[in-house]
Amino acid sequence: MSLLKKKRSIDSHEETELHSSEGLLVHPGGEALRQGVMLEETGFAYDAEQDIFYSVQEPWQRQYGYCRFYDVASPFMSLIFDSEPIRFDYDGKHWLIEFWKGQYGMTTGCEIGVYAAEEDSKADREFWREGSWSERAVWGILRFLGDTLYRAVDPKEQLLMSMTMMKNNEVLFTRKERHWWLTGFVLGEFSEPEELTARFRITLKTRAMRQAFVEALGQRGYDHVSILADGKTVEFVFDTPYSFQPITRRGVVRMLAQANNRSNCEMYHDLTQGSETKEALRETYKSL
């Protein structure tokens, strides 16, 4: 999960008055914004059956790839989550498959992101020449800081993935799709990352890739008992992360961020209390 990924989050952290009027969301200033436009801009869609939001195949976040800096900066955007980056080499590329779970503004959720970086410098030169000015700016800053910018994998490299999100041993939602960024978020649900557990299942491209991934999991701290491998598929439970978590998500930063997140969740429930209001919002999302 990242700062750049979430800076247009469905949680705007402003006291927005939510009420439905012919499929519109009306802002206190009087400006009516169509829900479809809002969701398209954030890069998410709505699953009415499970009442969750999830990332689409081609969101705006895709162009910015991924790097460690995003995790470090995210707490300042009220994104408090556990992260577990798994890095390994396969087929001439440096791969990063990262897992997240936690509180994303006024939503509780989890993610799997699949990224890769080329081993040679030719790809970097092409990226610098063909990328947008914002992509080149991010790339330049990260190279200066010594961080690796991984790119979201191409459609042909996407992996079949599934997740089961649990809070205090109760299932919140499930997701399954061939994707590069599989996600799920429950709006208005407040959680501490320690309350959450996610079961992840990934089918890699080949057995060789699966082996490289399993070995990287082992190096991270997962033992053979906690990893289920069958053919090209790997399954494990993400509970307490083995990775060192950014210092920015501790102490005062976390306390203030979570206080803000809890307040926004409570405000959301106050504004949408009553089945008619929630059903109106649900029907609006369903019609998109």
Image: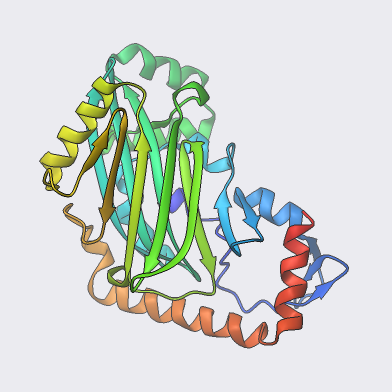
**Residue 19, position as x, y percentages in the image:** 77, 77
Hey, which quadrant is residue 104 in on the image? bottom left
Q: State the residue in front, 37 or 110.
A: 110
Q: Residue furthest front?
A: 230
Q: State the residue in front, 152 or 125.
A: 152
Indicate whether 265 appears above or below 92. below
Direction from residue 146 to residue 149 in the image, left or right: right
Hey, which quadrant is residue 121 in on the image? top left
Direction from residue 245 to residue 106 in the image, left or right: right
Hey, which quadrant is residue 96 in on the image? top left
**Residue 32, position as x, y percentages in the image:** 82, 66
Residue 159 visible, this orientation: yes
Q: State the residue in front, 88 or 68.
A: 88
Direction from residue 238 to residue 27 in the image, left or right: right
**Residue 103, position as x, y percentages in the image:** 41, 67
| Residue visible at 38% across and 65% down in the picture | 166
Image coloring type: rainbow
Residue 146 visible, this orientation: no
Q: Residue furthest top?
A: 122
**Residue 56, position as x, y percentages in the image:** 59, 43
| Residue visible at 33% across and 25% down in the picture | 117
Q: How many marks?
A: 0
| Residue visible at 39% across and 36% down in the picture | 114
| Residue visible at 26% across and 44% down in the picture | 85
Q: Residue furthest right?
A: 22
